[in-house]
Each structure stands twice: as structure tokens, then as C-alpha cells.
Image: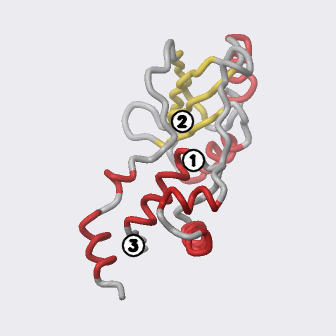
Amino acid sequence: MPLPKFDAIDLKILTQLQQDASLSNVDLAARVGLSPSPCLARVKQLEAGGVISRRVTLLDPVRLGSAISVFVHVTLEKQTEGRLNVFEQAMATLPEVMECYLMSGDSDYLLRVVVRDVVSLQQLIVEKLAKTAGVANIRSSFALKQVKYNTALPIETLVDFKRTKSSSSSSP
């Protein structure tokens, strides 16, 4: 799949929306130096191209009650396509699982789960994870302190500015 081509305005739009997805189109347009109509057209184009996949509201888990972040390493009995699919489908149904990654290395999957307390973690592990077909081993590590948490992608390091600049300068 060819990489999308961005110009400086697209990158400004993406940066602003990552900082505050609740911006009105008028406010967004003012921040990126466009009038509202072309700004909305660009946002719609970024959405249609899948660059903007969705917009969310981030909640503070501490203000919702005590929340514990736990990193769970899961090893499967076999790493067949069927077993991987079964596990991934099961994880998609668990609201406590915030992130799930297929890994290289010692474990097959790394999960980040958020639970209310240790009892909730025990229930998740014993009643759900351990009963998932094909699971052989589960290891957990508690996060003692969140040192950094960022939801915004580092656009400056991900986008090839040489390609972006040359493609925008060759446009009419």
C-alpha cells in the first residue's frame, strides 16, 4: 500500500487533533491557517484515507476510582494461526484489556490491563485468561508508577518530510 502524501497543513491538522479532538472545525481552521471549508475537506480526506481512524475522549482512571495497570505476558501452547486467532478474538471481548500485542521473544502476547484492584485482577486471570483455549503460561507485572503516558503519535519522526515536501512542492 502506498504511503499517503502529507503537506505541512495536513501535519498541522493531525497535530492539533491529537492534542484536542474536540476542536470545532472553525477553531481547527484558525489554528492551522485555513478557512473552515477547506479545513473540513482536509479532515474528511484524512478520515477517508484511514489516517484519522477515530476520535476519543481520554478519561483519568484515578478519578474514576482506584485503577491498577498490569502488564500480562501470555504464552500459548502452540503458535498456530488458529490458536493465535482464538486468543486474539477472546482478548477483543475483554474490556479490561486495553492493549494486546503479538510479541517476539519469551512470551507470545503482551497485554496491558486496567483493573480496579487485585481481586479484579485475580478474577480476570483465573476466570477469563486461564480459561482461554491454548493458554499455557501467564505472568503479570504491576505498574507502580506511570512515568509517561502519551496518546499522540510522534508525527515528526514518523512522516518522511523529504517525501512530503517534494510531493507538496510538485503539486500545482
Quadrant assignment for the N terminus = bottom left
Name of the residue lying farthest toward the bottom: 172
For this view, does 94 lie left or right of residue 155? right
Mark closer to the chain start, 2 or 1: 2
Q: Nearer the viewer, residue 76 or 42?
A: 42
Kind of residue indicated by mark 1: Leu
Residue located 60% across and 52% down the image: 82
Mark closer to the chain start, 2 or 3: 3
The residue under label 2 is: 77
- Which numbered mark, 1 or 3, is in the foreground of this view? 3
Which quadrant holds residue 99? top right
SS for tag 2?
A: loop
Percent of width and height locating residue 79: 50, 45
Could you say which disc has been placed on residue 5 in the image? 3
Percent of width and height locating residue 22: 66, 49
Figure check: 50 above or below 150? below
SS for tag 1?
A: helix
Q: CA distance from mark 2 to mark 3?
A: 43 Å
Q: Nearer the viewer, residue 5 or 120?
A: 5
Percent of width and height locating residue 76: 54, 36
Figure check: 15 above or below 102? below
Q: Nearer the viewer, residue 66 or 39?
A: 39
SS for tag 3?
A: loop
**Do the numbered discs 2 and 3 sit on residues whose CB atoms are within 8 Å?**
no
Q: CA distance from mark 2 to mark 1?
A: 10 Å
- Which numbered mark, 2 or 3, is in the foreground of this view? 3
Percent of width and height locating residue 113: 61, 28
**By what rule are the colours in the image chosen?**
secondary structure
Mark closer to the chain start, 1 or 3: 3
The residue under label 1 is: 84
